[in-house]
Amino acid sequence: MAFDAGFLAAVAAELRALALGAAVEKIYQPERDAVVLQMRSREGGKRLLLNAGSANPRVGFTEIPMENPQNPPQFCMLLRKRLSGARLSRVFQEGFERVLVMEFDTRDEMGFPTKCRLVAEMMGKYSNLIFTDGEGKILAVLRPVDFTTSALRQVLPGMRYELPPPQNKLNPLSVTKEEFFAMLPAGGERPADKWITATFLGISATVAREIVFRATGNTDTLLSDADAEALFDAFSAVFGDVLAEKFSPCLIVDENGLLREYAFLPLLQYGTMRKIESPSGLLDTWFGTRDREARIKQRANDVLRLLTNARARISHKLELQKRELAECERGEEYKRMGDLIVANCYQLQKGATRATLTDYEDYREDGTFGTVEVELDARLTPTANAQRYFKKYTKSKNAKVELSKQIELGKSELAYLATVDAALATAETPTDLLEIREELAKSGYASRVKTVERKGRGTPAPAFAEYRTSGGYRVLCGKNNLQNEYITHKVATKNDFWFHAKNKPGSHVVMLLEGKDEPPAADFTEAASIAAIFSEAQGAPQTEVDYTTVRNLKKTPGAKPGYVIYHMNWSAVVSPDKEEIAKLRVK
């Protein structure tokens, strides 16, 4: 599903309802292609996200936490200079294009009132943010477009802003019934939804299928089978609601809980849907996880590569060690061969390569003894051959002990790398990634992972996540092993409760009592759900979570960060609801 012109119209209506007259307090650029405007009005503070990335372009208010980088880009610096303190006075959409214009009242360098505009072009890989003065002169561009990039349209500072080239399509908001029927071909085997997207501006494939479904009861109806009157009625009803600013954003979720589609209107073609109160809330739900995963993949490529290579190396080493350990099981056989050679030494001579020896421990019912074939080294005397087998026995016995230790260390190393992998999956900010890099450096991976020194005196406290249960109890959640260790051993007291997904890599979760009585069952369930969500088991319908008091936790000397052991605990099986738990998070 694309961020189409209809959804942009819904966002524009939301901005007009909530942000007109709001002042711009702060501006920052957390990503290369994303700008956030911190705005404040009488209704309170809002953060407006303008994402011009080719993967997920969109505009809307956001509650997703984003960090302000220490060194802002030039585009961000210019916006701070010209937009700080400005008030949003007008928001409009250019026709039915995916172009949103936000006009601000501000003052120039001399203190005289003036206007400026921030134009958001949400057009897939051609998305862009353009800042102009009140007359349309371009002052700054997030992604400059020169002659080497496009011969049709250049977007550079100093030029006059012009709309993208027209697509020779009709505006669905202004088309008349006569124009609609005139464009409708007589007969034909073309799918009706394909005709709609090819004829009218700004309509996504999902919305086109919805119009056809409302008119015919099917999404794949051909033009020859569609009633023209019914098709126009469905078409005009959809865009009549757009003109009247009647939007009902909805999400389509499949049986596995995966998000499939979203739109600015109810998608009746899917039967069941989840309605969302606001367009911005829907965008946060749809893009939140995708954005975080994309940022992690982009910024943590070296860490992911390190983890993949380390796991492959350790797994290969474990396979070799297990094979050697299997060979060590022959140790008793080597000792037996040495004993047999000693017992039969009187009948052996140097130079033999094999010998059939009497086994005096294998006495049979007929009064005879069993025999065993033994390989000999022709270069050695019988006594030296016996010593050779005894040495192999001793070596196998010692190797068995050492290999068992090394195999356990390898398994422990793989388990630790699994916890780092889980931490990467739940990382939300650049600081989380920096802490993971610091942790790997402390664990001996400094030569294989890029580390960044933090500025300022001392090392700041890890930035863990905080929740507040329905009963008012503070719950702290570590998103990596450094945070886990900090909240478990530095913040929590002995009487606080500690939670962790059973036998799964994941976060430490601590519920602080802070002098209160033992929490109700609902609060325990909420804390256990947080531990389930921030673990390798996230997404599972049910997860078993261990919990105990902090006094029962022990840290082994020399253990990796975040590693604890415990022998007394309770367990609970929870079915976490991510949306409900997200509401408990302290912003």
Image: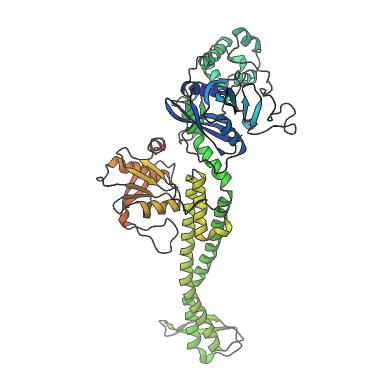
Q: Is residue 282 above or below residue 371?
A: above
* x and y, in percent, of residue 453 in the image: 54, 53
Q: Is residue 428 left or right of residue 489?
A: right
Q: Nearer the viewer, residue 308 or 247?
A: 247
Q: Nearer the viewer, residue 195 or 140?
A: 140
**Residue 219, visible in the rendered structure:** no
Q: Is residue 290 left or right of residue 367?
A: right
* x and y, in percent, of residue 431 in the image: 50, 47
Q: Is residue 316 above or below residue 34?
A: below
Q: Nearer the viewer, residue 126 or 391?
A: 126
The residue at the point 66 percent across, 18 percent down is: 169
Q: Nearer the viewer, residue 352 or 391?
A: 391
Quadrant for the C terminus, please: top left
* x and y, in percent, of residue 180 in the image: 62, 11
Give the image quarter of residue 205: top right
Display coloring: rainbow
Q: Residue furthest top?
A: 178
**Residue 460, visible in the rendered structure:** yes
Give the image quarter of residue 110: top right
Q: Residue furthest bottom?
A: 346
Q: Is residue 248 above or below residue 578?
A: above
Q: Residue furthest front?
A: 110
Q: How many marks?
A: 0
Quadrant for the N terminus, please: top right
The residue at the point 52 percent across, 24 percent down is: 88
Q: Is residue 112 left or right of residue 422?
A: right
* x and y, in percent, of residue 275 in the image: 44, 26
